[in-house]
Amino acid sequence: MIVLLVWLHMLAAVAWIGGTIFLSVVLVPVLRGEAFASQRSLLFRTTARRFRAVVWSAIAVLLLTGPLLLHQRGIPIADPSAWPAVLAAKLGLVAALLLLTLTHDLIVGPRVGRILRLPAESRSKLEQALVLWAPWLARFSLVLALAILFAAVALVRW
């Protein structure tokens, strides 16, 4: 049972982090090429929507398996004072990433999508700034995810 839980937990993490790396390092740079100029927005939106289902499925698996794995290791889930420091750090990073992901998926992403449908010259300064900074939100999410992965490795070694 423990092996299955670890496998599911790792599979969910790999799907989320690997997909995020793929989007950031492969898809976005390819779509910036001239060959995709006319379809760039459609391709990215379609891919991102599909990936969103993967992300939220992965989150569900991680939130279900994580507490079970802690319980299996004898770490009291309901008593944060008994947690190792690396677990507290990891869960803090997880909370920040979940908040960032919710903000991106429910607020920033839809708003940027609406802004991009406007002619560039009719966008306000705030809208232009949001379009400019939205990719940095995704990049920061990737950095948080990698930090969580590092904390997970450290926790396993604890």
Image (cartoon, rainbow, N blue to C red):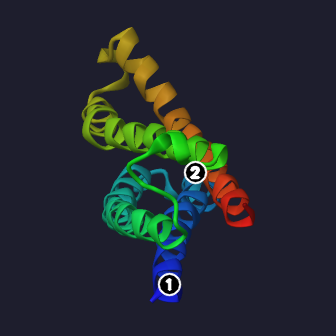
Quarter of the figure that contains the C terminus = bottom right
In the rendered image, residue 32, in percent from the top left (x then y), is placed at: 58, 49
Whole-number angstrom distance, CA of label 2 to CA of label 1? 23 Å
Considering the numbered disc 1 on the image, is that residue within a helix, a strand or a loop? helix
- Horizontal side of 46 relative to 147 (left or right) equals left
Q: Camera-side residue: 133 or 155?
A: 155
Report x, y in % for residue 150: 70, 55
Residue type pointed to by label 2: Ala
Work out whether residue 140 or residue 92 is closer to the camera in this orientation and state it: 92
- In the rendered image, the vertical position of residue 86 relative to residue 53, given as above or below: above
Type of residue at label 1? Ile
The residue depicted at 50 percent of the width and 35 percent of the height is 137
Identity of the residue drawn at 42% across and 37% down: 100
Q: Number of numbered discs present? A: 2
User: In the rendered view, does 49 fall on the left or right side of 88?
Assistant: left
Identify which residue, 153 or 121, lies in the foreground.
153
Q: Residue at x 57, y 51 (%)?
A: 145
The x, y position of residue 11, in whole percent, is 51, 77
Residue 85, located in which quarter of the rendered image?
Answer: top right
Which residue is located at x 54 percent, y 57 percent?
20
Q: Is disc 2 surrounded by few (<14), some (14 to 19) or many (20+) residues within 10 Å?
A: many
Residue where numbered disc 1 is placed: 2
Tell me which numbered mark, 2 or 1, is placed earlier along the sequence: 1
| Residue 16, horizontal then vertical, whole percent | 49, 63
* Label 2 vs label 1, nearer the camera: 1
Q: Tag 1: Cα neighbours inside 10 Å, few (<14), some, or many (≥20)? A: few
Does 17 sit left or right of 127 as displayed? right
> Considering only vertical position in the picture, is 81 above or below 128?
below
Residue for badge 2: 145
Numbered tag placed on residue 26 in the rendering: none
